[in-house]
Image: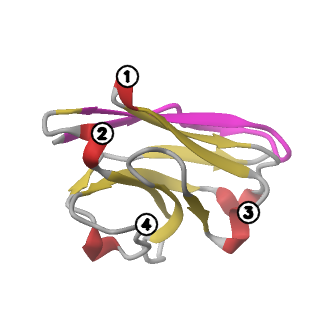
Amino acid sequence: VQLQASGGGLVQPGGSLRLSCAASGRSFSRSVMGWFRQAPGLEREFVAGVTWNGRTTYYAEPVKGRFTIARVNAKNTVYLQMYSLKPEDTAVYFCAAAFGLPGIATMTPDYDYWGQGTQVTVSS
């Protein structure tokens, strides 16, 4: 599986961005998909996840109510819509795919494939 993340950029506090992750290769529709982020000097952390059919989502506490994860299996794509962005959301954002899981995982070792990351910078 190859994952290609895009959509990052520079945005002012309170602004919005939508990240996309396009998948190719192994059956995307069977995967649990997650978004993670990593700020300089910090460990990679879970942001949001979605089950294979898109019916169940899970969010890290800092982004609840501001971020929305969704997937379109027909397009082999998962999205992360981000609203009300804060400077502390600044990080490189990664999408990841996991196979064989019963539900959404929040730990990096649970994911099998990773995209290359896209930079999100929230600053005035």
Q: Which residues are magenta?
A: 2-23
Q: Residue 115 in the image: state x and y as whole percent.
A: 30, 46
Disc on the earlier residue, 1 or 3? 3
Question: Which label was assigned to residue 17?
Answer: none
Disc on the earlier residue, 3 or 4? 3
Residue position for label 3: 64
Instruction: In this rendered view, identify the residue nearer to me: 107 or 120.
Output: 107
Q: Residue 76 in the image: state x and y as whole percent.
A: 33, 29
Q: Residue 4 in the image: state x and y as whole percent.
A: 31, 35
Disc on the earlier residue, 3 or 2? 2
Residue position for label 4: 104
| Residue 85 higher or lower than 62, as above or below | above
Of circles 3 and 2, the one toward us is 2
Crowding around mark 2 (Cα neighbors within 10 Å: few <14, some 14 to 19, many 20+) is many
Based on the picture, tell me whether residue 6 belongs to the magenta stretch.
yes
Q: Amino acid at mark 2?
A: Ser
| Residue 40 higher or lower than 97, as above or below | below
Q: Quadrant of residue 106?
A: bottom left
